[in-house]
Image (cartoon, rainbow, N blue to C red):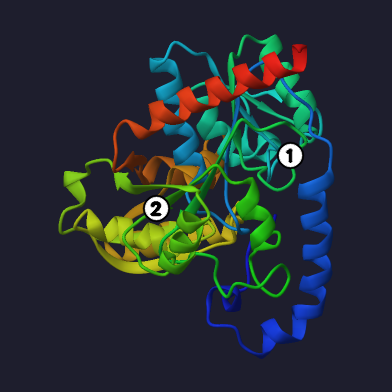
């Protein structure tokens, strides 16, 4: 996964994309063959994947959280499975939301672990087995659509309606992780997030191919104290622009913007600059939940920044409120048929 994607990936293809196209072709050949032919290990419980077509965030983690809540309402015990990107641990680990730090397990697993059993594992098969051992009756993968070695019962591809698939080229010429025809064949449904129209052509193509289309928005939780307030907004996520739009939707005025690499940990001088700038200009610091968990558990400047910042929490709201429950039911039924077929 690319932690800080080049800006030209998200623009109309130019000479940089065309210069790297031969390398993208080779990358795509390997990635596509892996998706089509690599053996997948079947689990005795339903497996749902919240993934995306491209490198970079599209809202997978909020989607996974929404699915977990739907699974609980259906009487399931959901367990999140993540590779722990950005963390240093290379062993299969049950994430402790209170005691682990982002440096060890990654930022997204810490967010997931606040809501349900979460395991990080470089080997997703081992991670899935650990979740089942710990009592999970349904597995939700945060990412892994292209690379997982698990049999997936429902593949939900999350697509940002503003960035879509960028310039449409594969890595390293663009953000696409594997050839789109191959990815389309493996998708159960596409979740279009937001009110942009840059993904519309792809959505129409997917609909013609019989792929279910769902729609949702990232809805910030109320923050009335930010209405009319001048803020310093900082974020180390794949698409900081999405965060800035969210802050503005709450009625805040962004006076200063600071973007950092996705999953990146702030250096001492960067944290001091944020605090000093906000103090000097009378600004409220605001950031994402993912950035905040990278600060928590530390002392010194990180602790000061964590205490001073207002965290903007968001939830994935499906246009059809019944959609998450339907996804759970579809996955359970697909797993049931899969297991029966295996016994036949």
User: Circle 1 sits on which residue?
Assistant: 148
Query: Looking at the picture, does residue 253 appear above or below residue 329?
Result: below
- Mark 1 is surrounded, within 10 Å at the Cα level, by few (under 14), some (14 to 19) or many (20 or more) other residues, namely many
Task: Give the residue at the far bottom of this rendering.
Answer: 15
Decide if residue 104 is on the left or right side of residue 208.
right
Is 55 in front, or is 322?
322
Q: Residue 319: percent from the left, percent from the top?
A: 29, 43
- The residue drawn where x is 61% and y is 59% is 54
User: The N terminus is located in which quarter?
Assistant: bottom right
Decide if residue 333 is on the left or right side of residue 213.
right
Q: Which badge, 2 or 1, is on the more N-terminal residue?
A: 1
Decide if residue 325 is on the left or right side of residue 334.
left
> What whole-number distance in Å separates the C-alpha atoms at marks 2 and 1?
23 Å
- The residue drawn where x is 71% and y is 31% is 151
Is 268 in front, or is 97?
97
User: The C terminus is located in which quarter?
Assistant: top right
Residue 69, image quadrant: top left
Q: Residue 232: percent from the left, percent from the top?
A: 35, 61
Residue 283 shows in this picture: no
Decide if residue 156 is on the left or right side of residue 224.
right
User: Circle 2 sits on which residue?
Assistant: 193
- The residue drawn where x is 79% and y is 56% is 31
Q: Secondary structure at mark 1?
A: loop
Q: Residue 178: percent from the left, percent from the top?
A: 71, 59
Task: Give the residue at the far front of this rendering.
Answer: 344
Q: Residue 130: percent from the left, percent from the top?
A: 73, 17
Residue 80 shows in this picture: yes
- Mark 2 is surrounded, within 10 Å at the Cα level, by few (under 14), some (14 to 19) or many (20 or more) other residues, namely many
Residue 307 disc label: none
């Amino acid at each position: 996964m690319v932690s800080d994607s080049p800006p030209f990936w998200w623009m109309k293809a130019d000479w940089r994309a065309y210069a790297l196209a031969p390398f993208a072709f080779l990358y795509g050949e390997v990635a596509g063959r892996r998706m089509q032919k690599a053996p997948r290990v079947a689990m005795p419980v339903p497996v749902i994947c919240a993934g995306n077509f491209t490198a970079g965030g599209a809202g997978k983690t909020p989607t996974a959280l929404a699915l977990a809540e739907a699974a609980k309402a259906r009487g399931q015990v959901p367990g999140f499975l993540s590779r722990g990107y950005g963390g240093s641990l290379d062993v299969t680990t049950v994430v402790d939301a209170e005691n682990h730090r982002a440096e060890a397990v990654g930022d997204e697993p810490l967010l997931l672990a606040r809501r349900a059993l979460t395991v990080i594992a470089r080997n997703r098969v081992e991670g899935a087995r650990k979740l089942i051992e710990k009592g999970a009756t349904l597995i939700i993968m945060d990412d892994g659509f292209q690379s997982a070695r698990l049999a997936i019962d429902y593949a939900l591809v999350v697509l940002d309606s503003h960035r879509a698939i960028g310039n449409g080229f594969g890595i390293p010429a663009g953000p696409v992780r594997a050839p789109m025809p191959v990815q389309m064949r493996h998708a159960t449904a596409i979740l279009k997030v937001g009110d942009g129209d840059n993904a519309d052509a792809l959505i129409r193509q997917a609909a013609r191919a019989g792929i279910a289309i769902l729609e949702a928005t990232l809805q910030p939780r109320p923050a009335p104290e930010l209405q009319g307030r001048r803020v310093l907004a900082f974020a180390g996520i794949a698409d900081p622009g999405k965060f800035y739009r969210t802050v503005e939707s709450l009625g805040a005025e962004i006076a200063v913007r600071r973007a950092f690499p996705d999953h990146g940990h702030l250096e001492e001088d960067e944290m001091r600059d944020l605090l000093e700038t906000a103090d000097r200009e009378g600004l409220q610091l605001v950031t994402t939940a993912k950035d905040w968990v990278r600060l928590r558990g530390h002392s010194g400047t990180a602790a000061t920044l964590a205490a001073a910042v207002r965290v903007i929490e968001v939830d994935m709201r499906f246009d059809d409120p019944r959609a998450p429950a339907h996804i759970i039911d579809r996955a359970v039924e697909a797993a049931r048929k899969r297991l029966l077929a295996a016994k036949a």
